[in-house]
Image: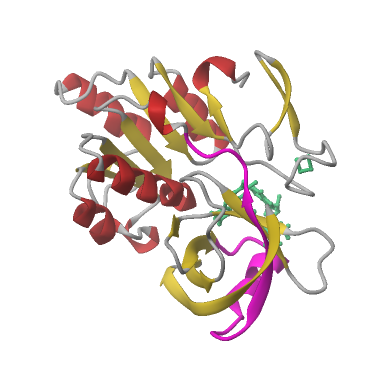
């Protein structure tokens, strides 16, 4: 992990309240999907953690929802502005554990870490089934990009405006009923209640826990949670945890 200066290349509104920011800078230390950056915002004491939605040799994409002061400041930034980011942080998904027909599921902004995971697994000859969930069509993003990955895709919206009506859990149950997936393994990112609900219908998997953070690199212990293996720092031992180890 290093404190890197990234330059904003674009900062576009994706859908209501949600932005995609492309940051150019050194990505050579990033080891895989599921890692995150911790962003310094002028005037705010704590950095703001954001998942790396996508990365390549030249930079990273982050997708963020405006929820408070920091994210509102980010939305007001322009191409050419710079951001200091601790990058990369966290462990990322353990690709070696993911079986061929895993479910990859994300809710809202949580769909993003799933995007590059889907790309990497599909390119490696695996056949994941992606299930992404949004409140409604207005808040949906990246549907075309997910389709372009070439994996099976199911979209769920709470109001039924697109795809299955209901949550990603409703969509996953439907896939099982239709014999399209046995829900043996899932990689999951989203709000805690959604992830807990997925864990209740899935035999095994990996979960992107998130939560509140301070330092982001293991020093302050502020993000410590209890797991089946004892205390763990979400920012350091996680944010990706095995289903068997999580105490919801
Ligand atoms: C590892 C990690 C990865 C994340 N990745 C993303 C991402 O890819 N995209 C994205 O939009 N968000 C992501 N988040 C959440 C993001 O960090 C917060 O939304 C952000 O820090 C809020 O900053 P703020 O100054 O705008 O809000 P604040 O003014 O700090 O808070 C405003 C409101 O948002 C709530 N809030 C603040 N932080 C969080 C949080 N961490 N989780 C949930 N609610 C929060 C507060 O309780 C409060 O109600 C991630 C969080 C973690 C820990
Ligand atoms: S946020 Fe400081 S140890 Fe995790």
**Residue 51: image location, x then y, percent:** 55, 52
Quadrant assignment, res 25 = bottom right
Q: Identify the residue at image location x=62%, y=42%.
A: 90
Figure quarter occupied by ligand 2: top right
Please identify the quadrant where the C terminus is shown.
Answer: top right
**Residue 203: image location, x then y, percent:** 39, 14
Write the start and end of the magenta stretch as one range: 65-93
Q: Is residue 167 magenta?
A: no
Question: Of residues 165 and 207, which is closer to you in this image?
Answer: 207
Q: Does the magenta stretch include residue 68?
A: yes
Left or right of 84, for residue 96:
left
**Residue 167: image location, x then y, percent:** 37, 37
- Whether residue 115 is visible, yes or no, is yes
Left or right of 229, for residue 198:
left
Q: Is residue 232 above or below residue 214?
A: above
Q: In this view, does 62 lie above or below 109?
A: below
Quadrant assignment, res 120 = top left
**Residue 29: image location, x then y, percent:** 57, 53
Q: Identify the residue at image location x=66%, y=31%.
A: 237
Q: Identify the residue at image location x=24%, y=18%.
A: 182
């Amino acid at each position: 992990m290093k404190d890197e200066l990234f330059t904003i290349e674009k900062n576009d509104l994706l859908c209501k309240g949600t932005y995609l920011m492309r940051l150019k800078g050194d990505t050579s230390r990033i080891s895989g999907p599921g890692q995150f950056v911790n962003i310094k915002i002028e005037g705010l004491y704590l950095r703001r953690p954001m998942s790396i939605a996508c990365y390549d040799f030249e930079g990273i994409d982050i997708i963020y929802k405006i929820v408070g002061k920091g994210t509102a400041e980010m939305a007001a930034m322009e191409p050419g502005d710079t951001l200091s980011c601790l990058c990369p942080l966290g462990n990322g998904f353990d690709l070696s554990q993911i079986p061929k027909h895993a479910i990859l599921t994300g809710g809202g902004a949580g769909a993003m870490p799933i995007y590059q995971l889907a790309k990497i697994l599909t390119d490696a000859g695996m056949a994941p089934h992606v299930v992404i969930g949004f409140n409604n069509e207005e808040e949906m993003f990246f549907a075309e990009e997910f389709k372009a990955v070439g994996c099976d895709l199911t979209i769920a919206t709470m109001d039924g405006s697109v795809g299955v009506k209901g949550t990603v859990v409703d969509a996953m149950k439907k896939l099982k009923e239709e014999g399209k997936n046995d829900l043996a393994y899932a990689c999951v990112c989203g709000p805690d209640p959604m992830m807990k609900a997925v864990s209740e219908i899935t035999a095994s998997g990996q979960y992107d826990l998130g939560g509140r953070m301070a330092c982001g690199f293991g020093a302050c212990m502020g993000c410590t949670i209890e797991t089946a293996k004892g205390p763990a720092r979400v920012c350091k031992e996680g944010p990706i945890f095995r289903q068997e180890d999580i105490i919801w």
